[in-house]
Image: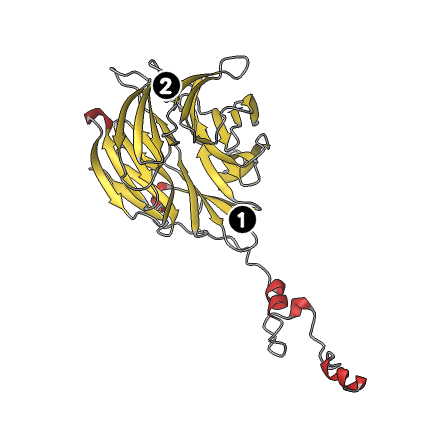
Amino acid sequence: MFPQRSSEVYRTPVTHQPPPALELAGNLEYPNLNVADLNARMENLSPRLHDCWDSIAINDHNHLALATNRREGRHWWGMFFGYGREQMHHMTVDTADFKLQADHTVNIVRYAENDVLLVALGDTRLQAWSTYSKVRDPQSPYCLFLVGESCAHPTPISQLCVFKADPRKAVSGSADSTLNVWDISGADLVSSYRSRSSHTDKLTALTTPSASADKFVTCDRGGCARLWDVRAAAPSSTCLYADSSHLLSFTSAAWASATELQGDNYIYLGDYDGKVHTLDVRVPRKLAETREYFGKGHVAQLIINGPYLAAMSNLPASVKVSNVQAGHEVIYTHQETHSRLTDAVWTDDSTLITIGHGRKMVTHAIK
């Protein structure tokens, strides 16, 4: 049997006195305290364009708003920036007209009016920022001022659209099927219309028309699309389509531009099988047309620009642009656009910009 004093060999030596945790970074005398060393290092929170480019918006003055996020490590946070069209290919922290660092991720940015930016944060907040004012600062008119803020959604906002016919109004939706219509005409952010259970399944997309500020369309993962009228005293909707076969799962939506023949009545819906379906609001519960855009991957986003419909997919990330007035003839295709495509905007009649992770920004010239 060992003598009891031999156990002293396994005790921590008296000479082992490491410095406090904050002084461990770079200390070579105690190399085995890696966890304490890592926790003691201060996180780099300096302003920068992060690797994840998640949202982009453009106003009538061709001014871009960009949201980038840090989505790694134990602390996620993001920033949004404002750039002129001439700065589009030289975006840095220093060349931004305005910038703001947020404590949470910046999920979506959308211009309401030309000088008002809506920002959806990862902690369920929706903010309205004034971005330009010669009254506040004549020397540097691009400056941020918080107009309003609200936490009207129980979960983070996943969909945000501005009514083109009235940019002082916007509609937001979250995956739990909560909807809010926002009014910013009174220099504040006010929810004027709210529904807590718009769909029985996960809300996946919403879209607004170009000629009206009274209605919008939503769709869900269960293959249901609904038309909403915000003029009603209480939230009310009409079922445009409900998939009884359980084969459809809608992922994206776009409201077609008004034409002489179709008016303002056509809706395009993308699904998980890579198809784009056409709905006529005058003929509910019936698909007018179905076209296959992608053999692999779902339709992640649809953006309309006059006769051109841009359809974007992930896995793999790719872009297709078709002329819907010519029978959905595909006039442009781009493969492996990003490692993950997240958002896109039309900058003019023939130029599409996509952003994402990996290859952060790509310009597509449609000829």
User: Splitting the image into 4 quarters, where does residue 328 fall?
Assistant: top left
Q: Classify residue 174 as left or right of residue 278.
A: right
> First in sequence: mark 2 or mark 1?
1
Q: Which x, y percent locates residue 243? A: 38, 24
- The amino acid on which the numbered mark 1 sits, given as a three-letter code, is Trp
Local secondary structure at mark 2: loop
Quarter of the image with the N terminus is bottom right
Q: How many marks?
A: 2
- The amino acid on which the numbered mark 2 sits, given as a three-letter code, is Ala
Q: Which x, y percent locates residue 303? A: 33, 32
Please name the colour scheme applied to the rendered image. secondary structure
Q: Residue furthest right?
A: 4
- How far, Cα to Cα, is label 2 from label 1? 37 Å
Q: Is residue 344 visible in this depiction of the protein? A: yes
Q: Which mark is residue 211?
A: 2
Q: Classify residue 163 as left or right of residue 176.
A: left
Quick check: marks 2 and 1 in contact, CB under 8 Å?
no
Q: Tell us which disc is closer to us: 2 or 1.
A: 1
- Residue at image position (30%, 38%) is 352
Quarter of the image with the C terminus is top left
Q: Which x, y percent locates residue 30? A: 63, 76
Q: Classify residue 69 as left or right of residue 329.
A: right
Local secondary structure at mark 1: strand
- Residue at image position (70%, 69%) is 20
Q: Is residue 137 visible in this depiction of the protein? A: no
Q: Which x, y percent locates residue 136? A: 54, 36
Q: Which residue corresponds to mark 1?
A: 77
- Residue at image position (36%, 17%) is 285
Q: Classify residue 298 as left or right of residue 329.
A: right
